[in-house]
Image (cartoon, rainbow, N blue to C red):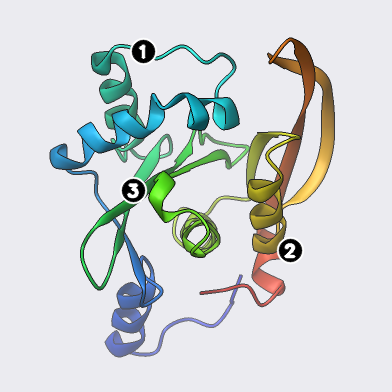
Amino acid sequence: MSEVQWSSSDEASEYGSRLLTDGTITLRALSESDIPRLVAWWNRPDWAALQQRIIKPRPDGPVEEMFRNWSANTPLRDTGFSIVSNDTGELLGHLTLYGASLPERCASFAILIGPDHVGHGIGPKATQLALSYGFRELGLNRIELRAWAFNTRAIRAYEKAGFVLEGRRREAVFHDGRFHDELLMSVLARDYLTGERLV
């Protein structure tokens, strides 16, 4: 992390102005109007296969509460954002850094991009913003995630953002009559902040 202290209010304002945006997307607080769309995406079987242990649509209430909890933004616990387009204000997805605690300063990362917005670079951009925020503002030391080994598109995006493979849980999830591996990936603050990946 930079050891140079700000020398003016302009530097602080500049940091704040770019902390949650890259110019094309912005991370903002969850809005109640976001929730129905997020729930619909979460419950789509084609999306559930990529992220959930079992494809079983859940009632809206528990899923709504899950997104609210992820976005409660309580100190040192869960921090979540809706991902929106700067041009249109359209909801593109949701991400969260959850489970952070002292003294480990480690959070888990999860992201959901709306099916119509996949393949447009939104996931990698949002992941970069989340990592920068987690390390530069929350003071995290480690951000980790778990991904099914067959979710190759997501894994490529995570690697591009700086996540490295740490381990493999063999045959950890069951879909389509067979078992699949789960990957554990992480980024450390010292690697991220010295790797020129700052947004």
**Outermost left residue:** 33
Image x and y of residue 171, in percent: 82, 17
**Marks 2, 3: nearer the viewer:** 3
Image x and y of residue 109, in percent: 54, 41
Residue at the disc numbered 3: 81
Residue visible at 46% across and 11% down in the picture: 56
Q: Nearer the viewer, residue 8 or 43?
A: 43
Q: Earlier in the sequence, mark 2 or mark 3?
A: 3
Q: Is residue 54 above or below residue 118?
A: above
Q: Is residue 60 left or right of residue 50?
A: left
Residue visible at 63% across and 73% down in the picture: 197
Q: Is residue 199 left or right of residue 61?
A: right
| Quadrant including the N terminus | bottom right
Q: Residues within 10 Å of mark 1 (few under 14, many from 20)?
A: few
In space, the residues marked 1 and 2 are separated at their CA atoms by: 38 Å
Query: Image quadrant of residue 43?
Result: top left
Secondary structure under badge 3?
strand
In space, the residues marked 3 and 1 are separated at their CA atoms by: 22 Å
Residue visible at 67% across and 35% down in the picture: 147
Residue 188, can we see it?
Answer: no
Residue 46, can we see it?
Answer: yes
Residue at the disc numbered 2: 191
Residue at the disc numbered 1: 58
Q: Nearer the viewer, residue 172 or 14?
A: 172
